[in-house]
Image (cartoon, helix red, strand yellow):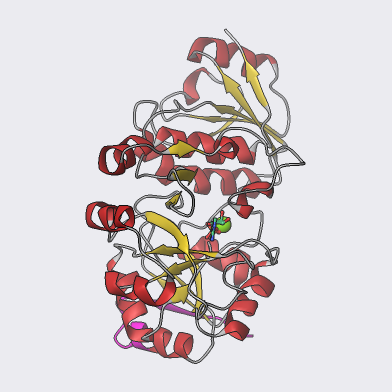
Amino acid sequence: MKTTWWKAEEPGAVEQAGKLLREGGLVAIPTETVYGLAANAWDSTAVEGIFAAKGRPQDNPLIIHIARESQVQELAAAVPALAQKLFQAFWPGPLTVVLPKSSRVPSQVSGNLPTVAVRFPSHPVAQAVIQAAGVPLAAPSANRSGRPSPTSAQHVWEDLSGRIAGILDGGSCPVGVESTVVSLAQDTPRLLRPGSITVEQLRAVIGEVDVDPAVLSPLQKETAASSPGMKYQHYAPLARVILVEGPYAAYRDFVNSHAGPGVAALCYEGEQEGLRTDTVCFGREQDASGQARALFDALRQLDARGIRIAYARCPRQEGIGLAVYNRLLRAAGFEVIHIG
Ligand code: AMP
Ligand code: MG
């Protein structure tokens, strides 16, 4: 299949992408979080195409993207008062809300779960293409399954060219990590995936929010995943990533004593000088938003440079730092070394 690369600002590009989507095609679109691989959410054959193009396990459900808050009524069987509060506070924006599913939503979208995940993105190109399509769009991240999520059209091209109809290039994604996912499908709201909207912000609006244990630890084999995506190896470069928790001086000494061919430091900006290894940076130490923006591109750079082992600085687990830590922890397969 020939994949078309449109610049979003090219005249007619958004309309063409919207038409292709409405007619069952697969198009990668920019959002404020990461690029999504979109399909018409009402079209189960198109949705099956997403799983085939990504190599995604069938039981890992997709998020449905809308461009008007009222569209949530067509997708959810019920919209509780707490959901309305969240929409008012955070939509449009990087928050996905899990609700009881309407029977109209194809089971392929929700991985056969009784719930549906919905998001109203704030990115102007995402909004324009959803409107042009005239239908809600099911869209997971536009990477090959298991790879780091794409934050640029180039990343999508590397993973999916030849497998999808087109890529709408809207530049690099301003947030850089996937949306916060909160489920309202049980008694107490539950954070399933941390993102740039923090658990503290959610609690300020809706009160009590539990943090799913899978956010910070590997799923136990016998427990069912509340968010099936959490049971799969994720965001993983080919390199083995090891998180190194401790102060900079101890990190530097540790990395320098493990230096060698194919070994890299995945460190913060400004730390390269003291390190006697290859380095790839992901933002500054005090800037968790900058780390979020840079992380997935940094993970892809490790592979481009043929790195075998990357020792990563360990982000602080507060605010959006929790999301950065959560993604790195998965990229590392939960391998963490404590030093200093
Ligand atoms: P991705 O779009 O690739 O970031 O993946 C979507 C994420 O949302 C995955 O981690 C899914 O497990 C999660 N998700 C989607 N739908 C649901 C749902 N109905 N219940 C719980 N988690 C969901
Ligand atoms: Mg994904």
Q: Which of 170/107 is in front?
A: 107
Question: Splitting the image into 4 quarters, where does residue 222 fall?
Answer: top right
Q: Residue 158, image x and y in percent?
A: 60, 64
- Specify the quarter for ligand 1: bottom right
In the rendered structure, which segment of residues is drawn in magenta? 1-15
Q: Is residue 326 visible?
A: yes
Q: Relative to 317, is 197 on the left or the right?
A: left
Q: Residue 340, image x and y in percent?
A: 57, 7
Q: Residue 255, image x and y in percent?
A: 63, 19
Q: Relative to 236, is 97 on the left or the right?
A: left
Q: Is residue 163 visible?
A: no
Q: Which of 91/83 is in front?
A: 83
Residue at 49% across / 42% down in the picture?
Answer: 295
130 w.r.t. 206: above or below: below
Q: Which residue ends up furthest to the front in the rendered image?
A: 187
Residue at 46% across / 56% down in the picture?
Answer: 151
Question: Splitting the image into 4 quarters, where does residue 241 fall?
Answer: top right
1 w.r.t. 298: above or below: below
Residue 303: in magenta span: no
Q: Relative to 32, is 153 on the left or the right?
A: right
Residue at 56% across / 16% down in the picture?
Answer: 251
Q: Residue 223, image x and y in percent?
A: 71, 42
